[in-house]
Image (cartoon, coloured by chain):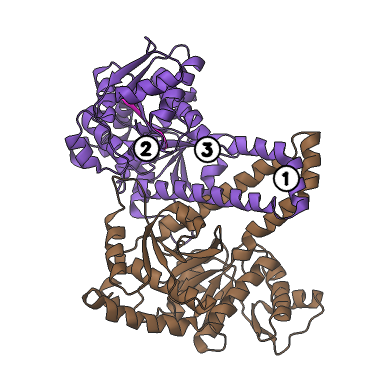
Chain colours: A brown, B purple
Amino acid sequence: MGGDHGPHVTVPSAVEYLRQDPEADIILVGIPDAIEAELHALKIAPNPRLRLHPASEVVGMDESPALALRNKKDSSMRIAINLVKSGEAQACISAGNTGALLATSRFVLKTIPGIDRPALAVVLPTISGHTYVLDLGANVNCTAEHLLQFGMMGATLVSSVEQKPNPSIGLLNIGEEDIKGNDIVKQAAELFRSSGLNFYGNIEGDDIYRGTTNVVVCDGFVGNVALKTSEGLAQMLASYLREEFKRTPFSKLAGWVALPVINAFKRRVDHRRYNGASLLGLRGIVIKSHGSADSFAFRCAIGRAAGEVRGGMLRHIGEHVEQLRHNIGQNIPNPASAK
Amino acid sequence: MGGDHGPHVTVPSAVEYLRQDPEADIILVGIPDAIEAELHALKIAPNPRLRLHPASEVVGMDESPALALRNKKDSSMRIAINLVKSGEAQACISAGNTGALLATSRFVLKTIPGIDRPALAVVLPTISGHTYVLDLGANVNCTAEHLLQFGMMGATLVSSVEQKPNPSIGLLNIGEEDIKGNDIVKQAAELFRSSGLNFYGNIEGDDIYRGTTNVVVCDGFVGNVALKTSEGLAQMLASYLREEFKRTPFSKLAGWVALPVINAFKRRVDHRRYNGASLLGLRGIVIKSHGSADSFAFRCAIGRAAGEVRGGMLRHIGEHVEQLRHNIGQNIPNPASAK
């Protein structure tokens, strides 16, 4: 029900996804009338692979997460997460209110033992491939232990979903010579070094898009600013490029000739392909789609959920928490004291 | 002497700058032999507008700032800053070791009364113009008072250099609904609201390049990550664009036709035009050029210094500190206790 377009995007996207992934089933959770209208428009009836699960309420995009959690027990978001909790669904995908999704998922599903806080991870393109960045805004104030846990979870995500053993982890820091980061980042680097994880060391902002490491770890404030700044820069550059190709009759002609190349470039940097942020650290798989996602973008988010389920990510995180506890020894992140 | 290319870039850049700015004089500070060799190659002799001031040492690009400050009392950097202190020069421009420049400037020049910490400010392009962002890495851990001071200094820089009265100030924050930033940012917003400054409110990363405000305030860790991330993204996009225009014989032809447009685009996003970070809050004007600057970029940094001198920036900051103290009243940033 969520996102800027609601079922008008999510329902067709689910239908299309099932065509490309014959092993998957989807449960559409929401107001039956709204969902049935979309299915009807697509001339599709609910069927065993595409079931409808009713919910009587919807969490608004600007609603307070705390109020949504307390008052909307029959919201589509809550019910969808409940289905993950009960095991009826193996993952929940939502384009709705991010704060409410975070709060409700955490309340209903709880965190994996040994993980203090869930984190939001996204995939970003790099010069030679892509990289996973977390946290993207779920945690504003992080301790060194949290950053360590983010690194472990990010690495587990990569190894589970991409069958890439021992992914490298970079700790986002700053590069001015006088100052090698704040105390928390320095402590986190120490923890990483004794963690047994494949820790590359400190990296700087430009290393994200350079693809220096498979995983980039930072606190949610820094990660959110880096992501939003990137969005703004990409929009500005796109706007400049458009303007230059429209400036004179010659440049319009050049733009026409170069159109196939420009389109190939656009496809390559299409942010829709990277849609779907993973909430890591919960006892269930939850994916947050961008609110403005179109059908293609939302399908990518569904695909991301399927990849995490098939890669056995939850089980792997559980195993890796144990390993980390063993390796860190005395420095064990204690969920009771760190919470 | 500093930067990746030393006098080979800075000397020709200074010579060229004097041609375009007939009111300016430049003092070249450094190892006489190295500077004279460059002047000789350009067939120019030292003259009243382009003097040579000898220094016997050079601060290395990777040298410890603390050691440089303690041991290299006759470095070109130290001497150049001394010339600002004595009033013989009105500004110092360096492409050298950033940490050493920060530490030495602060030690020699001291901060303006009422300013606790100097900040590094840069100009970044936006969709419709440009914006000033600070801090870019001089301060990793900032209090709310520091952020307020950064905002005031950034606004003073804009009004002094661009004759723009009352520039708008945005406080960089994150946009997830659940979490409206950390405590320091929240406190800073309160201070800004009672400061009498033209405070726009919280902004997000994408607002930087959207040009939402004339000044963007953040702590040095966040600012440095945002800037470096932008550099990395721009490099990646440029690399993608190059690759697409080289992929097939047709795309090469299209690239040839579109070359003038691509070049116009490149000129517009040319980061060299934005070279020169201002160290704000000192009792003297100091500009940090990118270490990799070429002659054109270094000239931009010199021009920035001249603009700050001519705009009377130092005097204006002093005045605005007084005004801020008056407006904030009880919340007055107390240099003694906040240090």
Tell us which disc is closer to us: 3 or 1.
1
Q: Mark on residue B120?
A: 2
Image: B24 above or below B156: above
Tell me whether the residue at label 3 lies in contact with that at label 1, contact meaning CB atoms closer than 8 angstroms: no
Q: Quadrant of residue A297?
A: bottom right
Q: What residue type is labelled 1?
A: Gly
Magenta region includes residue A283: no
**Among the two numbered marks 2 and 3 on one chain, the one whose residue lies closer to the N terminus:** 2
Horizontal and vertical percent position of residue B13: 46, 24
Answer yes or no: are tags 2 and 3 on the same subunit.
yes
> Is B141 displayed left or right of A154 in the figure?
left
**Among the two numbered marks 3 and 1 on one chain, the one whose residue lies closer to the N terminus:** 1
For label 1, the residue is B255
CA–CA distance between discs 3 and 1?
22 Å
CA–CA distance between discs 2 and 3?
17 Å
> Is B206 displayed left or right of B78 in the figure?
right
Q: What element carries label 2?
A: strand
* Residue pictured at 73% horizontal, 88% vertical: A47
Chain bearing tag 1 is: B
CA–CA distance between discs 1 and 2?
39 Å
For label 3, the residue is B271
Q: Which amino acid does label 3 sit on?
A: His
Image: B53 above or below B121: above
Q: Is mark 1 on a helix, strand or loop?
A: helix
